[in-house]
Image: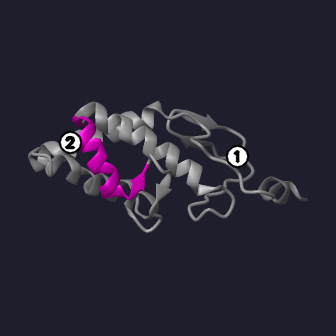
């Protein structure tokens, strides 16, 4: 049987893997809020409150109201592209571009490392029963 590995975790016996990017099984809102909160905290640690506030606008989230623009960067593009977009918060605040990218990448990596499963994931109503149905 093939082994499934993700990060530092390995699963030797796995019968099924489901990827849910479009919110079919998992409520994306709590997941994205958790992701945004963790990333914003790390952005703030590296750049301060003003850059963290600008970052929220750039990626399309308002953590005070819990509003997420699902057509914005946080809700619609891959992490690698979001890193470039998010780097604009540092760049517009006076960081040279290469330093802005490096600092954003470091903050995102720290945010990812500090996150723990289930990463804010909440199953949609009926999803578990549907998956367990034989």
Question: Which corner quadrant of the image does residue 84 belong to?
Answer: bottom left
Q: Which mark is residue 1?
A: 1
Question: Which corner quadrant of the image does residue 51 belong to?
Answer: top left
Q: Is any part of residue 94 visible from this angle? A: yes
User: The magenta stretch spans which residues?
Assistant: 47-62
Find disc 2 in the rendering and name its residue.
102
Image coordinates of residue 33 in percent, x first then y, are: 51, 48
At mark 1, the secondary structure is: loop
Q: Which mark is residue 110?
A: none
Q: Is residue 7 above or below residue 74?
A: above
Image coordinates of residue 4 in percent, x first then y, are: 61, 44
Locate residue 119 relative to residue 97 in the image: left or right: right
Image coordinates of residue 14 in percent, x first then y, are: 72, 46
Q: Earlier in the sequence, mark 1 or mark 2?
A: 1
User: Closer to the observer: label 1 or label 2?
Assistant: 2
Q: CA distance from mark 1 to mark 2?
A: 39 Å
Q: Residue at x 67, y 48 (%)?
A: 122
Which residue ends up furthest to the right in the rendered image?
134
């Amino acid at each position: 049987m093939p082994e499934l590995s993700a990060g530092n975790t390995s699963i030797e016996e796995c019968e099924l893997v489901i990827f849910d990017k479009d919110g079919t099984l998992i409520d994306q809102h709590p997941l994205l809020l958790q992701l945004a909160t963790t990333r914003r905290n790390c952005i703030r640690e590296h750049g301060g409150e003003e850059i963290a506030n600008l970052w929220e606008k750039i990626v399309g989230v308002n953590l005070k109201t819990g509003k997420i623009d699902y057509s914005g960067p946080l809700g619609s593009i891959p992490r690698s592209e979001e890193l470039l977009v998010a780097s604009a918060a540092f760049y517009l605040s006076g960081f040279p571009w290469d330093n802005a990218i490096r600092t954003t990448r470091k903050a995102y990596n720290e945010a990812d490392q500090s996150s723990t499963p289930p990463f804010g994931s909440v199953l949609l109503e009926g999803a578990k029963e549907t998956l367990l149905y034989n």
